[in-house]
Image: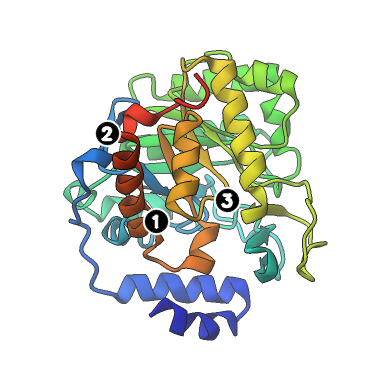
Amino acid sequence: MYNLARPLLFAFDAESAHGLSLAALRLLPISSARRSPPELSVNFAGLHFPSPVGLAPGYDKNAEIFAKAYGIGFGFVEIGTVTPLPQAGNPRPRLFRLVEDRAVINRMGFNNEGMEAAASRIGAIARQHRVGPLGINIGANKDSEDRIADYEKAMARLAPLADYVTVNISSPNTPGLRALQDKSALDDLLLRVRAVAPDGPPLFLKVAPDLEPADIDDIAIERGIDALIISNTTITRPPLQSSHASEAGGLSGAPLKSLAQQRLTDFRKATGGRIGLIGVGGIASAEDAYARIRAGASLVQLYSALVYEGPYLARRINKGLIELLRRDGFANISEAVGVDVD
């Protein structure tokens, strides 16, 4: 069905098509109570994940359809990025499909309705309708005078509603945000955010792929975080065919795959398995997800591939992962984590 609908969606600009897909999921009678095979279950950061395949933030920025996402195959969902105050983001156009490259460039700029709107929607969905964990990705407002204080505010408001919270310091579309990845700034940020909810949900940190080896070693130091998410979009530009290749913003999709895979391997080696890892970037098949798991990721996330592969991609990946596990003699997905690196 998606192959038939895709030409219609692609007739719209990328952001309008995204809005249409959200509207369709809101209207479709999708049950969240879909069960995943036990071979795919993962216990990670004190949480139970029915499958390792998650919906990355950016798709459901405002917690509009997260309960439906479980029903199309996702084992967990991460909404956001959510900032304390609503903000419009950068001027349109700001989202571009690079069809020839199976990629996306975005410079959205944390456009969202703010933490109160997200909290209201999440609170209206009973927890039993979450068949997998719900993560909330938090960020700072663009015009904030104290960005770390923004993370504290978002943590205080949203942590009680989340199964885990992700601190996003790696978007390239908020000027100066990535400077928070520097060692001293990162120490201060994580100390203050964790202090807001010392007994709160697990705390994850999302980092950029555009890091130097020294940056990786600094970030890999244990700081009381429960996991690293690797990685966000890249500001680098490998050879691309699309006419949108020169657009400013973060690049995701197929061209990010090799860089994100390498960064995951780098972090697995740097952490020695002491910190849990989640792999993101260019994942579009069971083989892609399995490679990330074998390189050290306990979980994976995807978003851009949905543009080209359709809404039921997670179901197909889950099915393919079971076949790959059985081929290689693993009884459970966790047995495969890091086997190519450790």
Could you tell which of marks 2 and 1 lies nearer the N-terminus? 1
x then y, percent, for residue 155? 45, 34
CA–CA distance in space, label 3 to label 1: 23 Å
Q: Is residue 169 left or right of residue 279?
A: right
x then y, percent, for residue 67? 29, 57
The foreground one among 319 and 273 is: 319
Residue 198 in view of the camera: yes
Could you tell which of marks 3 and 1 lies nearer the N-terminus? 1
Q: Residue at x 25, y 42 (%)?
A: 50
Q: For mark 2, does the 10 Å Cα neighbourhood hold few (<14), some (14 to 19), or many (20 or more) residues?
A: some
Residue that label 2 marks:
332
Mark 3 residue element = loop
Q: Nearer the viewer, mark 3 or mark 2?
A: 2
x then y, percent, for residue 264? 57, 31
Q: Residue at x 79, y 51 (%)?
A: 237
Three-letter amino acid code of the residue under disc 3: Gly
